[in-house]
Amino acid sequence: MSTVEVKNIKNEKVGEIELNDQVFNREVKTHLLHDVVRQQRAARRAGTASTKTRKEVTGSSSKPYRQKGTGRARAGSRKSPLWRGGGTTFGPKPRDYSFKLNRKVRQQAVSMAMSARFQEGNLVVLDDFTMEAIKTKDFVSIMKVLELNNALIVIAADNDELSKSSRNVPGYKVMKSEGLNVYDILLHEKLVVLQPAIESLEERFTA
């Protein structure tokens, strides 16, 4: 079992907590992280790019001029891809870019991403993150005290004051433990986990 300090929002040490090594200190396989990030990004692609083929563009399908005797190359339609305003050959059409990965692979990758942040010394555990009101200025002040410039904050239960205070501040994201994923962990420099969320994460990834 690994041990990490527990701090409060004043950046004071208030205790220590033992972490399950199967969740927070396991071997990191970068190829798995790569696969899962690629899968997440592919699933987010709209896939709405579309071009018109020669049968879909507007224009006459009649022969523009006679076959021989003009000195020009033969042409059968103004909708040919060779002509300006004609159709596109092998252009993109709406498609689904997503692909599937096994659930166990995705779970292992999330655990590895958290382990990577712990091994780098970029995992911060807070005992609580209570804000009296929704106020961005207060959130920014707390981040300065904690010396966090770019962080993903993982909470165990809904916290409107924290979520709404942070949503307009670039570089920060608040997320419930159920939605924790590889892409968001790797996108942020620091991983900040509230102590109650540690327990739910360990239950989730050791079940």
Image (tube, rainbow, N blue to C red):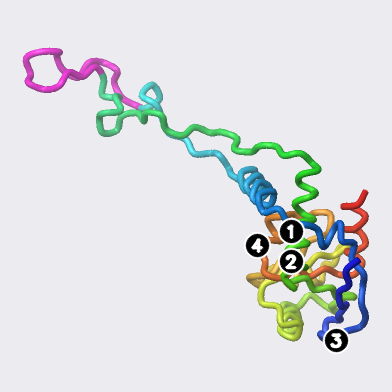
- Secondary element at tag 1: helix
Q: Main secondary structure of the magenta part?
A: loop
Which residue position is annotated with label 1?
Answer: 113
2 or 3: mark nearer the eye: 2
At label 3, counting other C-alpha atoms closer than 10 Å, the crowd grade (few under 14, some 14-19, many 20 or more) is few
Nearer the N terminus, badge 2 or badge 3? 3
* Percent of width and height locating residue 38: 62, 47
Nearer the N terminus, badge 3 or badge 4? 3
Q: Is 60 on the left-hand or right-hand side of 198? A: left
Which residue position is annotated with label 4?
Answer: 187
Which residue position is annotated with label 3?
Answer: 12
Magenta span: 58-76
* Percent of width and height locating residue 99: 66, 37
Alpha carbon distance from label 2 to label 1:
7 Å
- Secondary element at tag 3: loop
Q: Report which quarter residue 153 is drawn in.
A: bottom right
User: Amino acid type of disc 2?
Assistant: Arg
* Percent of width and height locating residue 158: 86, 63
Which residue is depicted at the point 38% across and 21% down? 55
